[in-house]
Amino acid sequence: MGEVTLWWGMLFGAIGVGYLVYARRQRAPVPLVCGLGLVLFPCFVSSAWAMVLVGAVLVALPWFVRT
């Protein structure tokens, strides 16, 4: 794991924690699932490009899926 993947993992993890806090206060399931995904997926993805792709999808998903 390189320095770039650590920075991307930290960025997506911070956004994921923000989604978790928002989801808990609003009782919204989609940001909750995306927040958990953003916090956990950097542990399993080692490629920087794959991390950016998966992270961007998980960050954008609550904007397009409304419940």
Image (cartoon, rainbow, N blue to C red):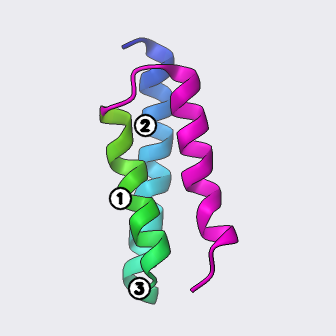
Q: Amino acid at mark 3?
A: Arg
SS at mark 2 in the image? helix
What residue did someone put label 2 on?
10
What residue did someone put label 3 on?
25
How far across and how far down the image is residue 34, in percent?
A: 46, 61
Marked residue nearer the N-terminal end (3 or 1): 3
Q: Residue furthest right?
A: 64
| Nearest-to-viewer mark from 3 and 1 | 1
The magenta region covers 44-67
Q: Nearer the viewer, residue 42 or 66?
A: 66
Q: Residues within 10 Å of mark 2 (few under 14, many from 20)?
A: some
Q: Nearer the viewer, residue 8 or 49?
A: 49
Marked residue nearer the N-terminal end (2 or 3): 2
- In the picture, measured across the screen, residue 65 lies left or right of residue 55, that is right
Contact (CB < 8 A) between labels 3 and 1?
Answer: no
What residue did someone put label 1 on?
36
Residue ID at (54%, 53%) = 58
